[in-house]
Image (cartoon, rainbow, N blue to C red):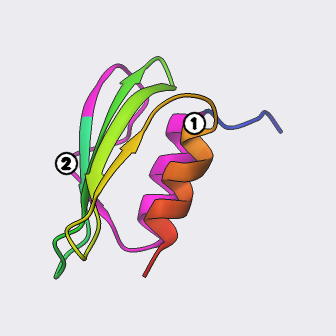
Amino acid sequence: MSAQTGQQRVDHAALTHGWICNGGTVDDVGLYSYRRPGTASFVKVAYANGIILWADGITSARERRRFDGIGKADRLVSFLAEP
């Protein structure tokens, strides 16, 4: 079994925790938006070939979050798992 890219981990976490993506699978380059229905929560993620370049989001309490630097994939997956 090969290791998952940050992009695959985020997409799986979003699906697992009830977030909706703006479309399709995330296997290429682009800006993707995820939102959690019924809340103010959303996150926008910039990907390039499976690598997360950066991400910005808002919690359900409308607090801003920025994901960049080392460990951003882990922090983003944790953000998606928050209630």
Question: Does residue 73 appear left or right of residue 46 in this picture?
Answer: right
Numbered tag placed on residue 22 in the rendering: 2
Question: Counting other residues with Cα less than 10 Å from the Cα at mark 1, is it few (<14), some (14-19), or many (20 or more)?
Answer: many
Residue 46 point in image, percent of width and height: 33, 28
Q: Assign the N terminus to one quadrant of the image.
A: top right
Query: Hey, what amino acid is under mark 2?
Result: Asn
When the figure is inspected, residue 77 is found, relative to residue 24, above or below; the finding is below
Question: Does residue 44 appear left or right of residue 73 in this picture?
Answer: left
Q: Residue at x 42, y 60 (%)?
A: 14
Identify the mark nearer the N-term, 1 or 2. 1
Residue 22 point in image, percent of width and height: 19, 48
Q: Which residue is mark 1?
A: 6
Q: Residue at x 76, y 35 (%)?
A: 3
Q: Is residue 7 magenta?
A: yes
Question: Counting other residues with Cα less than 10 Å from the Cα at mark 2, is it few (<14), some (14-19), or many (20 or more)?
Answer: few
Q: Residue at x 56, y 41 (%)?
A: 73
Which residues make up the magenta segment? 6-31
Cα separation between marks 1 and 2? 18 Å
Residue 28 point in image, percent of width and height: 39, 22
Q: Residue at x 42, y 82 (%)?
A: 83
Per the image, label 1 sits on a secondary structure element best described as: helix
Question: Does residue 69 appear left or right of residue 46 in this picture?
Answer: right
